[in-house]
Amino acid sequence: MARVIERSDRHLLEALRNGKQMTVEQLGEALAVTATAVRQRLERLIAAGAVTRQELRQGRGRPSYQYTLTDAGAELLGHNLADLARVMWSEIARIEDRQTRTQLLNRIGERMSEMYAAEIVGETNEERLQSLAECLRSREIGARVEQVAGQALPVLKITGCPYPGLSGPTHHEICEMEQSMFAGLLGHPIRLTDCRCHSAEGVCTFELENATNELENAATK
């Protein structure tokens, strides 16, 4: 779920990666844009922690600054890992022992849930499910929460698969990883009840465990 950056911002980060420390004037020349445009992009990137600035002491007058790419900025530029991901997932799928493969997928899901845990808020299962959907949408992944007849709790529907090149009708390893990750983020067991590969809607549906039981229990009170 990497943060998506604008193309113009990426060009500026690439210039800093090549030029190390640069001034606004140097960046403007490298990118063929005005100093005002450079400053606007720098403000966004500094706020995101992708760029830092250092004042240059040049006596009296208006201060001048040099801008440097941070480790976080370099990471934003280094998210072109699709080929590596496909190879790694194909190797995971080839692990013959089902228990070993499941344990590995669960560990990956747990580690990913740790990465995004701070973004999930809410006291109830429904609030946290809504927060998870917002987290996915912030990464340009289509997601919505719907109430389903006969269920005490709403379900999560993923309308745009985050990993279209890694999943398919006969390969559900990535779905198992997502299920583990979502469970960790929600603090509640969740399971995939309908996959986009077979769904009439073309969406993946995740249902909180024991939702039906909770409805039945509530009705008997």
Image (tube, rainbow, N blue to C red):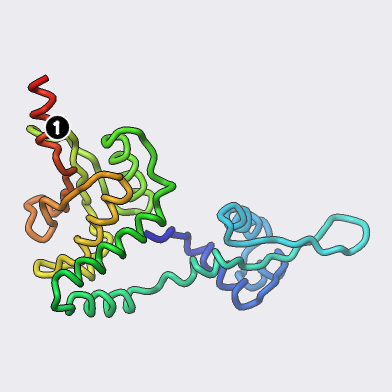
Residue 90 percent across, percent down from the top left? 22, 78
Observer-nearest of 14 and 26: 14
Asked if 2 appears above or below 188 in the picture, the reply is below
Kind of residue indicated by mark 1: Glu
Instruction: State left or right for residue 72 relative to residue 194.
Output: right
Residue 57: which quarter of the image? bottom right
148 relative to 164, above or below: above
Q: Is residue 206 left or right of residue 163?
A: left
Q: Quadrant of the C terminus?
A: top left
Residue 124, percent across and down? 30, 33
**Horizontal and vertical percent position of residue 80:** 40, 73
Residue wearing tag 1: 214
**Which percent across, then down, holds residue 197?**
11, 61
Q: Residue at x 25, y 56 (%)?
A: 180
Q: Secondary structure at mark 1?
A: helix
Q: Quadrant of the N terminus?
A: bottom left
